[in-house]
Amino acid sequence: MKVLNFYSQVFADQLRNGRKSGTIRLGDKSHKYERNDLVLVTIGFKHSPRERVFEAVIDDVEVKRLKDLSPHEIQHDNPECRRVEDLMSFLEQIYDRPVTLDDTVTIVRFSQIVDRASDFEDRLRGLGGARN
């Protein structure tokens, strides 16, 4: 099984409550993540314990330049970001390097896998998290 890891604890609550169902990664990651892949979503830093959040299925993988991202795609990644410049600053912090508008990014959208039918039905009705 592949792992989709998040370094920032900022995303922990967003992942758990269904507000975050996508991520934007620097570079072309289309060779790493493909539609219908099963992934384990985790939070933590390299060489440290990681928290298991949930299992998910990759819904879509799209590669484009940072400057071509829509406001909707940016908010899908980070509900706190509204503009491409906000996302650039955030990516610079995560990757610890300068990021430009011409950098390639990969948008990965995923859906949480739920274990019980009642959880699934609640999500379809919009209870306990956002609809995917």
Image: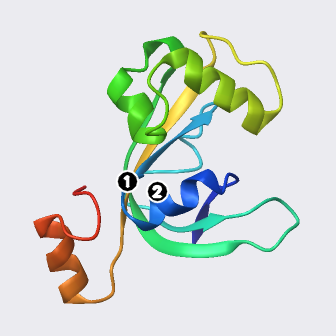
Q: Quadrant of the N terminus?
A: bottom right
Residue located beneath label 1 in the image? 19
Circle 2 Cα neighbour tier, 10 Å, few/some/many (<14 / 14–19 / ≥20): some
Residue occupying the far left of the picture:
125
Circle 1 Cα neighbour tier, 10 Å, few/some/many (<14 / 14–19 / ≥20): many
Do tag 2 and tag 1 residues touch (Cβ < 8 Å)? yes
Residue located beneath label 2 in the image? 14
Q: Amino acid at mark 1?
A: Arg
C-alpha distance separating marks 2 and 1? 5 Å
Lateral position of residue 86 relative to residue 63, left or right: right
The residue located at (42%, 52%) in the rendering is: 20
Rendered location of residue 39, percent (x, y): 51, 66
Q: Quadrant of the C terminus?
A: bottom left
User: Which of the 4 image quadrants contains residue 51?
Assistant: bottom right
Q: Residue 95, relative to residue 101: is it above or below?
A: below
Label 1 sits on a secondary structure element that is loop
Q: Residue 110, relative to residue 107: is it above or below?
A: below
The residue located at (59%, 49%) in the rendering is: 32
Rendered location of residue 71, percent (x, y): 37, 22
Viewer-proximal residue, 1 or 46?
A: 46
Rendered location of residue 94, percent (x, y): 74, 38
Q: Amino acid at mark 2?
A: Gln
User: Which of the 4 image quadrants contains residue 9?
Assistant: bottom right
The residue located at (80%, 74%) in the rendering is: 49
Rendered location of residue 76, percent (x, y): 39, 39
Q: Residue 127, relative to residue 29: is it above or below?
A: below
